[in-house]
Every structure is written in C-alpha cells, then in structure tokens.
C-alpha cells in the first residue's frame, strides 16, 4: 500500500538562514521521493512582512492554534513556520493537518521520515533474513559467484572466502563508446575516485604554484621581483604536460589492477575475466574476450556490476567522451564542454580548469540536484570565481566535427 503524499509548507523570510536550511532539506527529500513529499514554499521578502503575516495583521499562527488546538503554534514567533496540509494551495489554516514547528522541528520530522524500519515515518516492516535454499552439500562449482570486480564485489568475495566459502569473481569491462577499457577494480579504481584524486592533486599543485608559491619565492625571477618593487604576485601558469600526467595516472592504476589480482589469488578467490549471462537461477554462461564460451554454476550469487555513464542521444553524440574516457585520453583535451551539472561533471570541470584547460559547463536545470541547495550554490559561485564558465538552461542538440578537428556543439 502506497503511503499518502506529505505536503509540507515552509514559510519564512528570504534572508533567514534557518528558513533556508529547513526549506533546503525538505526540497532535497522531495527530489528523492517525489511521490511521497511535496514542498510548498512561502517566502517573504523581509522579516517585517513575515511577522505581519504570522503574528500581527493576518495572525496566521493564531488561526492555526484555534483550528488545530495546537498551543505551540500560537507561541511560535520565529522563522520558519512549517506545517502539513491537505493541499498545496496557499496558506489556508483550515487545510492544515499537522503543525510541525520551526527549523529544528522540521529537521526532526525529516529524520523521522527518512528512518527505515518500524521506527520510520510510516511504520514500515523491518527487513528479515529468509531461507534461500542454500545447503553445504550442493553440487555447484562455487558456493558464491560475484558478478562485478569493483569495490563491493571484491570486498564481498574476500570476506566470504575468509569465512570458508568457495568463491569466484566474474569481471569484464565492455568498451565504452569511445573504446576505453580497464582492469580489475571497478569504477573507483579505474575511472573514478583514484584517477580523479590524482588529477585533482595535479590541479591543486598547479594552482599552488601560481597563487601560493610566489610568496615563498618559488618561480619568482629577478625581473618579476624588480617589476613588482619587491612585492610578491602570482606566477604565470605552470607549463603542464597532459601526456605525462595521463601516463603516470594510468601506470598507478595498472599497478592497483595487478595488486587486486594478486590479493584475490592470495585469498583463494577465483578471478574470471569473462562476461556473464544468466542461464538459470544457478548457472551463468561466460564469454571471454576471444569469444570462448563456458558455464559456471553456483549456489548463491551477488550482483555488483555498478553503472556506466549515459551517452548523449543528440545527433553526433558519439563524438563526445565520458568520465569513462577522460582519464586515459591520449590527446590533450584542450577546450572542454562538460555536459551536465552532477557531481561527476563538476569534478571533471574542476580539475581540468585547475590544470589550465578552458572549461565550460552546460547546465540543463540546476547544479547538483538532490544536494543541499546552499552548498550547491556556494560550489557554483566558487567555480565561477576560479574561471569555470556556466551556460545555464541548455542541452546539446547536435555535435559536429570541424575541419580543424575540433567539435562544435
């Protein structure tokens, strides 16, 4: 049975931080659970206007107290003023189903809503383990087969093996549309956290050379010293070799791939570099990179395959590369358009800008949907101040290659 939608009204004045915080948290939950929560925002331009509505002229809080019998509402004088209602229309005290309170009360309500299990907002049943038919005397090849050799799959395989299970890990990377592949370790090791952090470190070092090190005399020539009358100023941007950076990052990643394989062997976990397809509940057909087929049977299976970026569907979308490709890109990316304003897109825009690339971000709607709105705004402002350009309310409709070999969007 689907729970009824909670329509949360949040009223406050524009400059109030507590109002902004309460509204932001409810807005985030509404984005995550659009069928369960709806935010209705009542923003007043000033504190005086808000208090006139709440206390003095309209006396909204008194109406709430009279109609709902809630004395807390009659004493509430701060911003925000939050309540649940049957509809999203205006501020009708007769429509209020529950008075929530101020900022802290609203955050407590949100925590209760997001709490799983029987203590949650709608008395959900607590999850329990049920028998799955496994027995120690099964006739399958493995006790446990894990599809996916990323962080979750590898951790699960080693933990199961340590408890005495016979375990195999099936890991195979289909090439990205641009042809990129990688080794054991999953997204984090190969095209996520690890190369991203190394690229970010390169950006921080480049920015440090330009803005920080001149104050310690690093990179400062006598001519620059004399020209600035002995006062320190920024260095010119450091010369950066994309080829050297990419090569060293990839060498580090390949070293981790090898260590993961050795680790599985030491933990007595069988590593199968093959693509798997389910035949039945206990059988997977495997295919290696040469097209050789085989079957593997198992008592239990964990699916830990992760995800891949969604390719652009516009005309010429195949000309674009994704986060699966950027860390191993052979050619210097040069001027870059990052399509989307998720955290992965902004991370890429950040480190590319930091190592001196001309970066622009195409934002369809808002930055960092689902994240705290105040934090998202601060991140956007910081990136703009650092030189990243944003083109808002746009999506690519066509990509085409120019005669100079560049891509026009």
Image: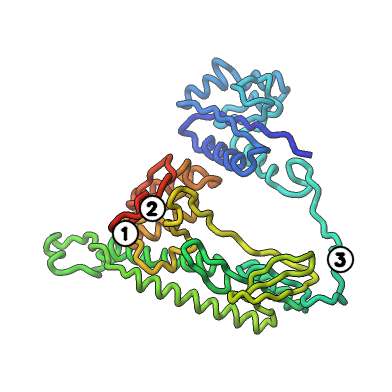
Residue that badge 2 annotates:
337
Residue occupying image coordinates x 40% and y 55%: 349
Residue that badge 3 annotates:
133
Q: In which quarter of the view is residue 129 placed?
A: bottom right
SS class, disc 2: strand
Q: In which quarter of the view is residue 199 placed?
A: bottom left
- 354 and 374: which is toward the camera: 354
Position of 135 with respect to 342 (left or right) is: right
Q: Position of residue 395 (x, y in %)?
A: 44, 44
Q: Earlier in the sequence, mark 2 or mark 1?
A: 2
| Crowdedness near tag 1: few (<14), some (14–19) or many (≥20) residues, C-alpha within 10 Å | few
Residue 78 can be seen, yes or no: no
- Marks 1 and 3, how far apart in space? 59 Å
Q: Position of residue 154 (x, y in %)?
A: 64, 72
The quadrant of the rendering that contains the N terminus is top right
SS class, disc 1: loop
Residue that badge 1 annotates:
405
Closer to us: mark 2 or mark 1? 1
SS class, disc 3: loop
- Marks 2 and 3, how far apart in space? 52 Å
Position of 88 with respect to 161 (left or right) is: left
Q: Position of residue 202 (x, y in %)?
A: 38, 67
Image vertical order of residue 111 relative to residue 217, above or below: above
- 303 and 115: which is toward the camera: 303
Specify the color scheme: rainbow
């Amino acid at each position: 049975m689907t729970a009824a939608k909670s329509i949360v009204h949040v009223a406050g004045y524009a400059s109030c931080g507590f109002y902004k915080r309460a509204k932001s948290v409810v807005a985030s939950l509404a984005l995550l659970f659009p069928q369960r929560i709806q935010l209705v925002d009542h923003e007043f331009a000033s504190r005086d206007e808000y208090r006139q509505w709440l206390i003095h002229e309209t006396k909204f809080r008194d109406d709430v107290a009279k109609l709902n019998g809630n004395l807390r509402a009659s004493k509430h004088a701060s911003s925000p003023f939050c309540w649940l209602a049957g509809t999203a229309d205006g501020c009708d005290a007769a429509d209020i189903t529950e008075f929530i309170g101020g900022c802290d009360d609203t955050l407590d309500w949100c925590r209760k809503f997001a709490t799983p299990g029987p203590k949650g907002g709608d008395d959900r049943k607590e999850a329990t383990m049920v028998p799955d038919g496994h027995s120690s005397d099964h006739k399958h090849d493995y006790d446990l087969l894990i599809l996916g050799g990323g962080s979750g799959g590898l951790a699960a395989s080693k933990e199961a093996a340590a408890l005495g299970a016979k375990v195999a890990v099936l890991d195979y990377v289909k090439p990205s549309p641009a042809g990129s592949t990688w080794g054991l370790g999953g997204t984090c090791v190969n095209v996520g956290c690890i190369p991203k952090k190394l690229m970010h470190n390169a950006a921080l070092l480049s920015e440090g050379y330009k803005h920080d090190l001149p104050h310690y005399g690093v990179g400062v020539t006598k001519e620059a010293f004399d020209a600035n009358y002995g006062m320190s100023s920024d260095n010119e941007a450091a010369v950066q070799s994309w080829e050297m950076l990419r090569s060293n990052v990839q060498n580090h990643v390949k070293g981790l791939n090898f260590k993961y394989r050795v680790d599985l062997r030491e933990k007595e976990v069988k590593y199968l570099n093959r693509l798997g397809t389910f035949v039945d509940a206990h059988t997977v057909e495997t295919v290696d990179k040469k097209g050789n087929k085989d079957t593997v049977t198992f008592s239990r299976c964990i699916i830990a395959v992760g995800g891949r970026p969604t390719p652009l569907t516009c005309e010429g979308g195949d000309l674009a590369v994704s986060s699966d490709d950027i860390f191993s890109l052979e050619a210097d990316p040069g001027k870059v358009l990052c399509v989307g304003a998720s955290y992965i897109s902004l991370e890429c825009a950040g480190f590319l800008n930091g190592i001196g690339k001309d970066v622009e971000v195409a934002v369809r709607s808002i930055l960092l949907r689902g994240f705290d709105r105040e934090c998202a705004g601060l991140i956007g402002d910081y990136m703009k101040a650092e030189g990243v350009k944003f083109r808002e309310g746009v999506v690519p409709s066509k990509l085409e290659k120019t005669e100079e070999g560049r891509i026009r969007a």
